[in-house]
């Protein structure tokens, strides 16, 4: 499975290619799915460009994207959007339009409570396990681990194209020791995005690409949009396995 991560916490200051508004996100999702993306991950944003879990922000973004594409759509629940985990759970309970899935970063305080709030609403969970954090240990101890939709093996801080694949392999080895039984989606960030994606294809794992993860194409030129990033994955690896 190849997921497109449309924007992430990036803003217009990072690149003019970052889609921000519901209309821009819907258009970007449409083009990315037409290019081969099978799933969408999005960070709904306020008019000033900040990530938000407010139902008044999440709802319009989900509605716009779903009018444009017929694939699963997920959102973030990152602590940067709402630092207090109790408040995050309250936001999830207040959503008037539900995503198909939402990512939960297991190194963040209150991850289990946030995940439980999602399960209570019938929303699938992408368990974000960041390399170099306590996430894998916390996830291993969580009674919710077998109930997540998939595990996101995320190489975020190691953006060196030479060392990121090694970091990814170490993370996968940690995850292999956890009896979660869920499919794994492996991805990297910035300079590590393409090398880690190639590793995912080599290992038969699902992956993702998009403006959140990479602002440049494999040859280093700036990515004009999400669709172009997806097209390059299809050219490099062909279709990826389901997750």
Image (cartoon, rainbow, N blue to C red):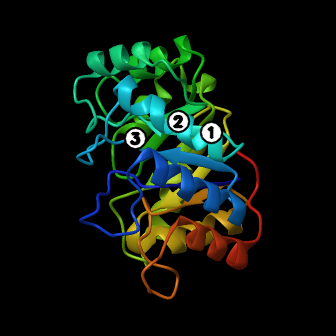
Residue 71 visible in the snapshot: yes
Label 2 SS: helix
**Pick the front one: 201 or 174:** 201
Instruction: Provide the residue designation for mark 3.
Output: 44
1 or 3: tag closer to the N-terminus: 3
Instruction: Provide the residue designation for mark 2.
Output: 62
Question: Could you tell whether 201 is left or right of 63 in the image?
Answer: right
**Pick the front one: 9 or 50:** 50
Q: Residue at x 63, y 40 (%)?
A: 67
Q: How many marks?
A: 3
**Pick the front one: 216 or 161:** 216
Numbered disc in front, either 1 or 3: 1
- The reply to whether dot 2 and dot 3 touch (C-beta < 8 Å) is yes
- Image coords of residue 68 (percent x, y): 64, 47
Q: Which mark is residue 66?
A: 1
2 or 3: tag closer to the N-terminus: 3
Q: Residue at x 39, y 24 (%)?
A: 55
In which quarter of the view is residue 119 placed? Answer: top right
Q: Residue at x 55, y 30 (%)?
A: 99
Label 1 SS: helix
For the residues labelled 2 and 3, the Cα–Cα distance comes to 8 Å
**Pick the front one: 68 or 163:** 68
Q: Which mark is residue 137?
A: none
Label 3 SS: loop
Query: Vertically, is 231 above or below 22?
Result: below
- Image coords of residue 150 (percent x, y): 62, 37
- The reply to whether dot 2 and dot 1 touch (C-beta < 8 Å) is yes
For the residues labelled 2 and 1, the Cα–Cα distance comes to 6 Å
């Amino acid at each position: 499975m190849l997921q497109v991560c449309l924007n992430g916490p990036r803003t217009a200051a990072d690149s003019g290619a970052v889609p921000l508004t519901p209309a821009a996100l819907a258009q970007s999702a449409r083009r990315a799915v037409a290019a081969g993306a099978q799933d969408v991950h999005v960070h709904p944003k306020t008019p000033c460009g900040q990530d938000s879990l407010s139902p008044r922000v999440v709802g319009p973004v989900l509605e716009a994207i779903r009018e444009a594409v017929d694939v699963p759509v997920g959102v973030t629940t990152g602590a940067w959007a709402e630092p207090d985990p109790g408040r995050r759970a309250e936001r999830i309970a207040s959503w008037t339009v539900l995503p198909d899935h939402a990512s939960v970063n297991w190194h963040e305080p209150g991850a289990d409570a946030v995940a439980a709030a999602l399960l209570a609403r019938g929303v699938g969970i992408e368990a974000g396990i960041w390399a170099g954090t306590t996430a894998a240990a916390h996830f291993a101890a969580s009674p919710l681990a077998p109930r997540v939709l998939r595990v996101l093996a995320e190489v975020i801080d190691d953006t060196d194209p030479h060392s990121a694949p090694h970091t990814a392999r170490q993370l996968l080895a940690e995850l292999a020791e956890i009896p979660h039984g869920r499919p794994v989606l492996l991805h990297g960030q910035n300079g590590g995005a393409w090398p880690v994606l190639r590793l995912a294809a080599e290992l038969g794992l699902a992956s993702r690409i998009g403006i959140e993860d990479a602002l440049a194409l494999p040859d280093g030129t700036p990515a004009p949009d999400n669709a172009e990033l997806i097209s390059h994955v299809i050219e490099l690896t062909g279709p990826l396995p389901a997750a």
